[in-house]
Image (spheres, rainbow, N blue to C red):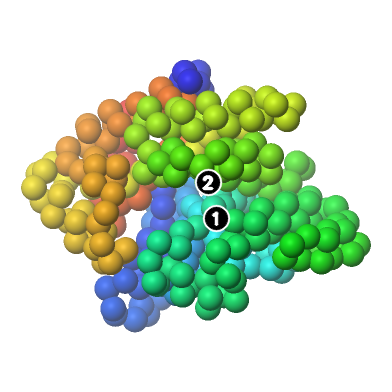
Amino acid sequence: MSISNSRLKLGLLLPTRHLLMTGDAPSSIEPVLSMAETAEQAGLDSVWVGDSLTAKPRLEPLTTLSAVALRTHRVRLGTAVLLAALRQPVGLAHALGTLDLISGGRLVVGAGVGGAFNDAQRQEWRNGGVDPSRRASRFEETIEVARKLTRGESVSHHGEHFDLSDVSVQPRSAQPDGIPYLIACHWQARREVQFQRAARIGDGVISITDYPEEYGMVLAKVAEYAEKQGRDFSTMEKAFYMTVNLESDGALANREADEFLHLYYGMNFWGDRWGPYGHPERAVERMRRYAEHGAETIIVRFASLNQERQLEIFLRDVAPAFS
């Protein structure tokens, strides 16, 4: 998979988890909104928010993006990634259509099946009324139904999880072709069904934790299945979500990242699949490798409790390499 001739697009993960994970109750979401404004003013292409109900407490993503939409004018607004199976598709489509209208058609939905790897994650699904063992099939139905509804279609669906007859919702997406849905795929998972799913129901692909070469293999797999279904893979969006710490002092960068990831997840289990941590040039080099393997958008999360400092370094020492 070769690099596109177009400029690599840069996105920023907003710290909606960071705001809550230190134990202090936040008094406002101003740090999130301010970072979004700074990102837009600096010329970044998009801002993104994560999703979790109880396992990794954070601000609710769609209401947060509505606030971000009113403080910005140009950047795309994304979820990285939305745990769609925690939601009912008619209500989800209503919220997404409303958010897209508020933002003037700037919404992109990265969505994934989500994990059930530990007790907290399994309990999160149960808290949402979802059997964790059935989350993948529920995810597919949710996306398929919401995708049609947000495009203004009337939907009848009689599936394993939802039974709907002649349902439509307003407002529909403000985008002529509807809200794009990027489906999460990971080479590490080694499950063929994820590539088939992305090719069938997605408008693009979003990945995390893969090495650049693995990311290229993810895209190749989705392209293979898209071709079998008569879909043009070249029109699908390709995004990658990476985690960095940009302190030039490598020892400091590693300490900050380890502290952040332990607070974020309760553990730090991905090793060098996160990162790089250290001099900004290392991040530039890794981002170029992802671009060489097909990434069109890189979403950056800062593994640091000092998010504003990391953004300052990123805008000064990393972003100009891709302008």
Asked if residue 296 can be seen in this view, the reply is no
Judging by the rendered image, the residue that carries numbered circle 1 is 113
- Asked whether 264 or 283 is in front, the reply is 264
145 to the left or right of 315: right
Near mark 2 (Cα within 10 A), the count class, few <14, some 14-19 or many ≥20, is many
Q: Measuring 38% from the left and 27% from the top, which residue is drawn there?
A: 213
Near mark 1 (Cα within 10 A), the count class, few <14, some 14-19 or many ≥20, is many
Judging by the rendered image, the residue that carries numbered circle 2 is 184
Q: Is residue 192 above or below residue 269?
A: above
290 to the left or right of 256: right
The image shows residue 208 at horizontal and vertical percentages of 41, 44
Residues under labels 1 and 2: Cα distance?
Answer: 8 Å
Q: Measuring 34% from the left and 81% from the top, which residue is drawn there?
A: 25
- Asked whether 27 or 271 is in front, the reply is 271
The image shows residue 236 at horizontal and vertical percentages of 62, 33
Q: Quadrant of residue 69?
A: bottom right
Mark 1: which secondary structure? loop
The image shows residue 200 at horizontal and vertical percentages of 69, 39
- Asked whether 46 or 52 is in front, the reply is 52
The amino acid type of the residue labelled 1 equals Val
Q: Measuring 27% from the left and 73% from the top, which residue is drawn there?
A: 22
The C terminus: image quadrant: top left
Are the two marked residues, 1 and 2, in contact with CB atoms closer than 8 angstroms?
yes
Asked if residue 123 can be seen in this view, the reply is yes
The amino acid type of the residue labelled 2 equals Ala
